[in-house]
Image (cartoon, rainbow, N blue to C red):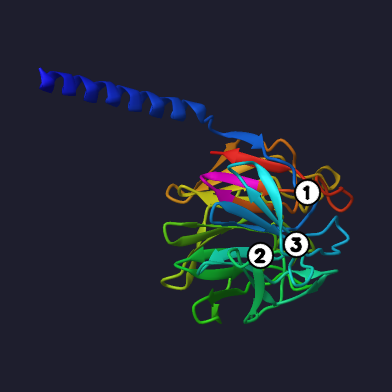
Amino acid sequence: MKTRILWMVVLLLSISIASVAVAQNAAVTHDTWSSGAPMPRALVSSAAAVFGKYIVVVGGAYGWSNVAIADTRIYDPASNTWRRGPSLPTPISGAAAAVANGLFYVIGGGDRNMYTNAVWAYDLQTRTWSSKSPMPTARGNFVAVVEKNTIYAIGGFNGSTTVNNVESYNPATDTWTEETPLPAGVLGLAAGLMKGWIVAADGNEGACGGCDYGQTQIYSPSSNAWYGGSSDPTPRDWVCGGSIDGQLYVASGYPADGYAGGESYTLTESFNAKSNTWATLADIPQGTIGAASAVYNGQLYCFGGAPSYPGGAALNNVQIYQP
């Protein structure tokens, strides 16, 4: 009798757990966009990265004047709230952000089109900034990807031309290493890590006076080599992007060919590295150029940006994509 009762209790618990799991899965609506609490300030060209259970958003500019600010804002996705962090030691716009070795790094960027190779590290526990060894190449509007606790800085703009430099930073030794460069210099690209490989796509190649690159390049840190992938059907730059579950997501961005008078795209696409194919997804609600990007808990976050270039006013939107 006791065995039968115990069996019934186990069965009921199993049914209950299964029901909760089904309910949780049903709550996720795939290929959709939603909104988070607006940023405290409307900004373009901020930098963002996930730091523990928070997303830290730093620097940026009020608009296309490129006059940088030193703000540090910390977003809590769980409570959908913002709080202020200690300001950067110097105003920075167009930097890249990454988290490695327990610290939040802000790399490069600049102010009023004067670019730097400075590296700053933020400790969330002590709420302090410290300087680190400078990056070999001063630049902005590039991407940083972390693989095995090493930060890879890829592409960008040095104030006069796009660059193809790829440089890796080891936080444990505070040293930089020159790696195999991109096939072409490119700014405003998207990149992410996929099973040990770094996938970079899109951006502005610059050599033709503003052509969008559209190429997909795949980097192997172990062999220090780049390999070509299928090109994005819709080339663009200054995108919001990141990798989730083996795919690179690219949202919105700027068409350098002057499409619609400089208005941003609303298109969202994904690149599947395994099949080497691109897919079209749900449009982002507000097209944006120069938004800060971060991937948290399987979702892509796009912070701010502007709807057009060069005349669009900065946005404070937080737009969230659920694959």
Mark found first going from the N terminus, 3 or 1 = 1
* Above or below 216: residue 282: above
The x, y position of residue 41, in whole percent, is 80, 50
Secondary structure state at the residue bearing disc 2: strand
Is residue 100 among what the camera can see? yes
Tell me which corner region of the image, top left, top right, bottom left or bottom right, holds residue 151.
bottom right
* Above or below 321: residue 203: below
Answer whether residue 299 is magenta in the image: yes
Secondary structure state at the residue bearing disc 1: loop
The Cα–Cα distance between marks 3 and 1, rounded to whole angstroms, is: 13 Å
The x, y position of residue 289, in whole percent, is 76, 50
Of the numbered discs in the image, which one, if any, rests on residue 40?
A: 1
Name the residue type under label 3: Gly
User: Who's the residue at 55% across and 48% down the image?
Assistant: 296
Q: Nearer the viewer, residue 52 or 47?
A: 52
Q: Nearer the viewer, residue 153 or 88?
A: 88
Left or right of 4 in this view: 86 = right
* Above or below 54: residue 106: below
Name the residue type under label 2: Ala
Mark found first going from the N terminus, 2 or 1 = 1
Q: Which residue is mark 2?
A: 96
* Above or below 299: residue 174: below
Which of discs 3 and 1 lies nearer the camera? The answer is 1
* Segment colored magenta: 295-301
Q: Which residue is mark 3?
A: 59
The Cα–Cα distance between marks 2 and 1, rounded to whole angstroms, is: 20 Å
The x, y position of residue 156, in whole percent, is 69, 68
